[in-house]
Amino acid sequence: MRTGFFYLTAILVIVSDQLTKWAVMSNLTPGPHPVLGSLITINPTQNDRSAFSLFSAHPWVFAAIACVAVVVLSVAFHKQQRRDLWVSAALALALGGAVGNGIDRGWLGYVRDFFDVRVIPVFNVADSAITAAVIVLAWRVVLRPPAPEPITDPAERRAEPDENAAPPAGSA
């Protein structure tokens, strides 16, 4: 995956996350709104805890974690020797999800969640992207051998010796 597509994917997650949060929070009253009977509802909530409401801490702790995640995910993408499309896509999804929820924590002090499927805590688009990223990374690392995509963009190619080039003059 090229660098532009990596960041474009992350930006699409961020925009989708923020737009859906805005649409739900500005148009629906608190409480469940059935989408598929009682199985799936839209339930606007404010989550001041971590992912899927599991841990509680000050909002700045989660905002700091999001900032660290942004740096780590970006560096992980750029440090790949050979770009694996699946790993790159997963890193982009996780990056978009971290930024999407980080925006909420930074501006509001909580995350806006609204998808409610009853068997797990209420979640949003950013949470979905992060979950998909974890699943793809687990699949790629555990279940499938890597099939890296060679870096074809000259701007991204590292200086590698050409095996077919003639040896320098005077070398044996």
Image (cartoon, rainbow, N blue to C red):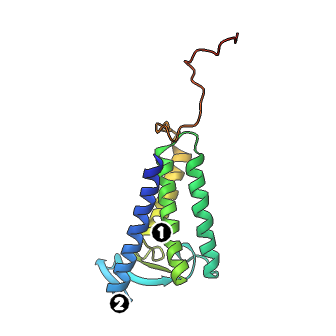
Kindly identify the residue that appears in the image at 39 percent across and 89 percent down: 30
Q: Considering the image in quadrants, where does the C terminus appear?
A: top right
Type of amino acid under label 1 = Asp
- Residue at mark 1: 127
Kindly identify the residue that appears in the image at 63 percent across and 72 percent down: 64
- Residue at mark 2: 29
- Figure check: 28 above or below 97: below
Horizontal and vertical percent position of residue 101: 50, 72
Side (left or right) of 71 relative to 118 = right
Which of the labelled discs sits on residue 27, or is there none?
Answer: none
Horizontal and vertical percent position of residue 24: 35, 81
Asked if labels 1 and 2 touch by Cβ distance under 8 angstroms, the answer is no
**Front residue of this view, candidates 96 and 156:** 156
C-alpha span from label 2 to label 1:
22 Å
Side (left or right) of 133 relative to 167 = left
Kindly identify the residue that appears in the image at 51 percent across and 83 percent down: 108
Side (left or right) of 150 relative to 33 = right
Numbered disc 2: secondary structure:
loop
Type of amino acid under label 2 = Thr
Dividing the picture into quarters, in which one does residue 70 lie? bottom right
Horizontal and vertical percent position of residue 16: 38, 68
